[in-house]
């Protein structure tokens, strides 16, 4: 009787062990399938920044500067608050005479503050308050990306924006588990991937990168807000106007 009892205990233990092993195998198989599906989905998303054509779900503006014109297409479907805020302020003339007050060659050029000190900003969305970062797996900080500046996590984005200028290859360390292959290839031509997931990309330069490079190449000195950073232009270029070539109806 005792031997039979021990046999039942051993058999029961083996059964439990088999169930646990099978369950574990199924879990890892499903987990692997899930990761594969996610990777496949990422590789199939539309990447509007890679086309210079302005699509039906996009807007277009021309930023006129003392250094030349920069044409940008905007992504209202993917970054609605950022684009609505930008277009509304542009119509109001908010950006006129804004200087590119922060310039770092091989990185970016920044503007969008009428005080030209980097301390001012304006929002006409989110009840006239700064708004949250809008992140999309379709938009990245490749060369020519137009992105909103912010002061950290939370609702801190508004009118200040920057254009990514870095022309150096930046694809090292990027994985297809987190980036579409086409974006990794595009980063070989420049960009700042370390900004991805932290700032709102809401536009892409489609012509005028030579103007962006010209502004970035200007002589700079220590930034009054950060003396360790050489980013304050000695002879700053400025925005003379923003022409809305193709607007967007945010009520539709």
Image (cartoon, rainbow, N blue to C red):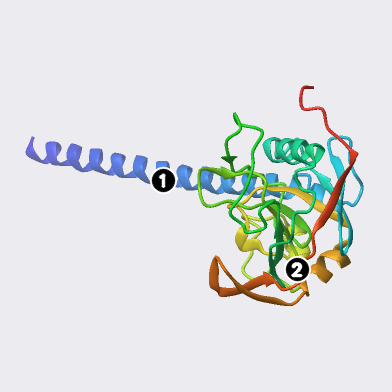
The mark found on residue 190 in the picture is 2
Q: Quadrant of residue 92?
A: top right
Cα distance, mark 1 to mark 2? 43 Å
Foreground pick, 152 / 63: 63
Q: Are marks 1 and 2 in contact (CB under 8 Å)?
A: no
Q: Is residue 192 above or below residue 84?
A: below
Q: Left or right: 185 with respect to 174? A: right
Q: Is the C terminus in the top left, top right, bottom left or bottom right quadrant? A: top right
Q: Is residue 8 left or right of residue 164?
A: left
Residue 116 quadrant: bottom right
Total count of labels: 2
Where residue 85 sits: x, y (%)?
71, 38
Q: Label 1: how many residues lie within 10 Å, few (<14), some (14-19) or many (20+)?
A: few
98 over 231 or under it: above or below: above
Residue 24 spot, x, y in % from top left: 41, 45
Up-down relation of residue 204 to residue 107 (above or below): above
The image shows residue 102 at horizontal and vertical percentages of 67, 64
134 with respect to 95 (left or right): left
Drawn side of residue 184 relative to residue 65, left or right: left
Q: Which residue is mark 1?
A: 24
Near-viewer residue (137 or 249): 249
């Amino acid at each position: 009787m005792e031997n039979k009892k021990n046999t039942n205990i051993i058999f029961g233990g083996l059964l439990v062990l088999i169930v646990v092993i099978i369950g574990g195998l199924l879990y890892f198989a499903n987990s692997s399938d899930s990761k594969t599906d996610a990777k496949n989905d990422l590789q199939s998303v539309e990447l509007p920044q890679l086309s210079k054509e302005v699509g039906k779900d996009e807007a277009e503006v021309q930023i006129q500067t003392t250094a030349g014109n920069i044409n940008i297409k905007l992504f209202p479907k993917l970054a609605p608050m950022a684009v609505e805020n930008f277009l509304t302020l542009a119509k109001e003339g908010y950006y006129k005479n804004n200087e590119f007050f922060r310039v770092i060659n091989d990185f970016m050029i920044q503007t969008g503050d009428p005080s030209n000190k980097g301390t001012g900003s304006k929002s006409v969305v989110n009840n006239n308050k700064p708004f949250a970062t809008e992140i999309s797996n379709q938009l990245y900080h490749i060369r020519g990306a137009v992105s909103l500046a912010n002061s950290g996590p939370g609702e801190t984005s508004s009118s200040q924006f920057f254009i990514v200028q870095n022309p150096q290859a930046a694809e090292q360390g990027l994985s297809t588990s987190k980036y579409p292959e086409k974006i990794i290839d595009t980063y070989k031509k420049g960009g700042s991937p370390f900004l991805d997931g932290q700032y709102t990309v809401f536009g892409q330069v489609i012509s005028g990168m030579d103007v962006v490079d010209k502004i970035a190449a200007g002589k700079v000195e220590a930034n009054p807000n950060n003396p360790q950073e050489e980013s304050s232009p000695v002879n700053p270029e400025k925005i003379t106007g923003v022409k809305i070539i193709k607007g967007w109806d945010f009520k539709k």
